Image (cartoon, rainbow, N blue to C red):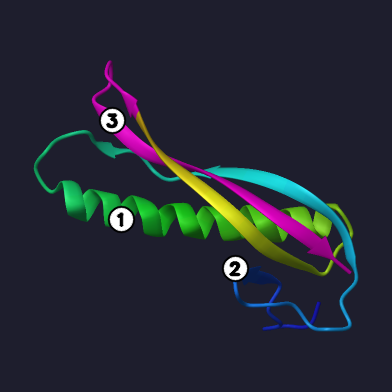
Amino acid sequence: MRVNEQAVFWHRDLPPLAAEAIGEHTVEATSRRVPDTIAHRDEWWTECRDDLMVHARERLTDEIARLGGRYAHVLTEAIDTTHDRASGDAWLRGRFTYVLYR
């Protein structure tokens, strides 16, 4: 892949027409943990969502290389909130289904 070449395409963004689909896959990613409190809930959610998307892009890029592809087109995503009552933490977990292209 050339420097600055886009490898991950989200939903309506499509990979180049010449790309050949070679399979459908799923990756999971998580955000960093934040305090599970009512205070600043919207801020925490936004930070976790942004962090989750960074980790998802990293996971997708790693999987593209590992599977010998060139592009990934994300079709669906499911994002859930996860809590650890013992530690008082919360975080987001995402599951992303994508088509791998070469």
Q: Marks 1 and 2: in contact by CB < 8 Å?
A: no
Image quarter where the N terminus lies is bottom right
- The residue located at (82%, 69%) in the rendering is 70
Q: How far across and down, in percent of the image, does residue 42 sit? A: 19, 52
N-term-proximal mark, 3 vs 1: 1
Q: Amino acid at mark 1?
A: Glu
Image height of 71 relative to 46, above or below: below
* Residue at image location 45% in from the left, 45% down from the top: 79
Label for residue 89? 3
Amino acid carrying mark 2 in the image: His
Residue holding disc 1: 47
Q: Position of residue 29 (x, y in %)?
A: 55, 44
Mark 3 → mark 2, Cα distance in angstroms: 30 Å
Range shown magenta: 83-102
Image-based side of 80 in relation to 36, left or right: right
Out of 66 and 73, give the one closest to the viewer: 73
Label 2 sits on a secondary structure element that is loop
Residues marked 3 and 2 touching at CB (< 8 Å)? no
